[in-house]
Amino acid sequence: MSEAGQSAASVTNVRSLSDAVREMKNAAADRADVVVEMREAVRTRLELLAQELQPVFADVPADDPSFDFVISSGEQPRLWIDAVAHVAMGRDRRTYRFLRDTRLGRVVLAESTEIAPVADQVTRYIAERMVERQRAVDGDVEVFPRRDETEVEVVPIAASRNAWRSFFGGLGLVLLGGVVGVVTVAVAMWDRFPELETLLSRF
């Protein structure tokens, strides 16, 4: 191959590579546009839900720090209700999923392609949280009864007497058993200790 032919082939290869790079860039831009469009579609649906819940959000006291009510940006936009509960879109980008993170994992509180049932569940959730917070502020919590250290237990006289009778009765049985045991040992060993017999005969 002549030098001119090699030069022409080199130019052709460079031009083909440039075209390929340009095509890859265009394809990447198209995919990015699709991702952006999908993200915007998800965000738009979440904004529709937020508009549906706007009267509920407005009724929550401004000094209540428990709730967020914001749509986060990112790869997966979410409508946050509080620190542990949010609404996200399903994989089909049409299903609303109301989720809550717990110590045992994430649970689904509501799931629907319609806004109304999800908005109703979010409203109930907000109401429950507000009631729980109010009860905590008011101190309306169940406490196990604890006996006061200064409290004096009153025992009926009859019960006290029965307790003393039981005590002395048990003590008498123990003493009686001891006496019987000593006598039994003495009788059994009487023949082995003649000095004991002589000593007792003197009395």
Image (cartoon, helix red, strand yellow):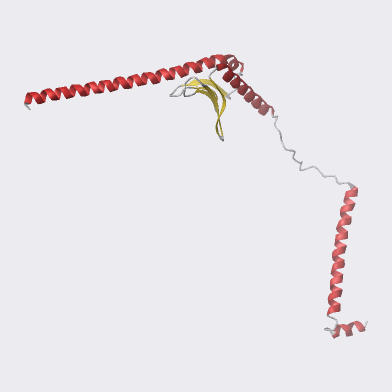
Residue 125 seen in this snapshot: yes
Q: Residue furthest right?
A: 203
96 vs 39, left or right, is right
Q: Residue at x 33, y 20 (%)?
A: 29
Q: Residue furthest left?
A: 2
Which of the 4 quarters of the picture holds residue 53?
top right
Which of the 4 quarters of the picture holds residue 16?
top left
Q: Looking at the picture, how far across and down is residue 195, in whole percent?
A: 85, 85
131 vs 170, left or right, is left
In the rendered view, tell whether residue 151 sits above or below residue 107. Answer: below
Q: Looking at the picture, how far across and down is residue 21, in whole percent?
A: 25, 23
Residue 63 seen in this snapshot: no
Q: Residue at x 85, y 75 (%)?
A: 184
Q: Looking at the picture, how far across and down is residue 142, in whole percent?
A: 71, 33
Q: How many marks?
A: 0
Q: Residue at x 16, y 22 (%)?
A: 12
Q: Looking at the picture, how far across and down is residue 48, in whole percent?
A: 52, 15
Position of the N terminus, as image quadrant, is top left
Position of the C terminus, as image quadrant, is bottom right
Nearer the observer, 134 or 86: 86
172 vs 115, left or right, is right
